[in-house]
Image (tube, helix red, strand yellow):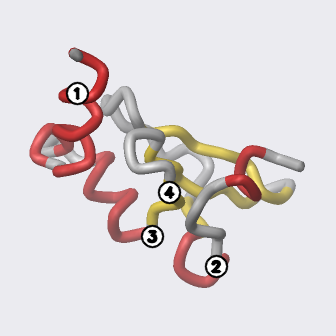
Amino acid sequence: MSGLEEKSTPAYYPVHVIPCDLRSECPFFKVEKVDEDQCVAVCTAADRVLTRSNARKCASPAWRECPFYKIGVESTSS
């Protein structure tokens, strides 16, 4: 079983597939390959697959404003 199948929110490809080269400076942002040329973004702080629009927000310069990032930072600093 892949890590993607273990996520609490399964991937629904029409809304979750992103370009495989999408990158973010957020330490909780991870790109996982789901097919030869298709990927999804995963937020490890929230343990969920991100929609395309949320993934783009994570890749933007304002990623530090994401509530999941703030939760992730708080949980790792304890």
Q: Earlier in the sequence, mark 2 or mark 3?
A: 2
- Residue under label 3: 51
Q: CA distance from mark 1 to mark 4?
A: 16 Å
How crowded pointer 3 is (Cα within 10 Å; few <14, some 14-19, many 20+) is rated as many
Name the foreground residue: 61 vs 77: 77
How many numbered discs? 4
Q: Earlier in the sequence, mark 1 or mark 4?
A: 4
> Height in image: 9 above or below 57?
below
How crowded pointer 4 is (Cα within 10 Å; few <14, some 14-19, many 20+) is rated as some
Q: Earlier in the sequence, mark 2 or mark 4?
A: 2
Q: Is residue 4 left or right of residue 51?
A: right
Q: CA distance from mark 4 to mark 3?
A: 10 Å
How crowded pointer 1 is (Cα within 10 Å; few <14, some 14-19, many 20+) is rated as some
Q: Nearer the viewer, mark 2 or mark 4?
A: 4
Q: CA distance from mark 1 to mark 2?
A: 27 Å
> Height in image: 63 above or below 49?
above
Q: Amino acid at mark 4?
A: Arg
The part of the image, by quadrant, that contains residue 38 is bottom right
Q: Earlier in the sequence, mark 1 or mark 2?
A: 2
- Disc 4 secondary structure class: strand
> Height in image: 23 above or below 47?
above
- Disc 2 secondary structure class: loop
Q: Position of residue 77 (x, y in %)?
A: 22, 16
Name the foreground residue: 30 vs 47: 47
- Residue under label 2: 12
- Residue under label 1: 73
Q: Residue at x 23, y 48 (%)?
A: 60
- Residue under label 4: 48
Q: Position of residue 17 (x, y in %)?
A: 60, 68
Q: Residue at x 49, y 49 (%)?
A: 47
Q: Amino acid at mark 1?
A: Val
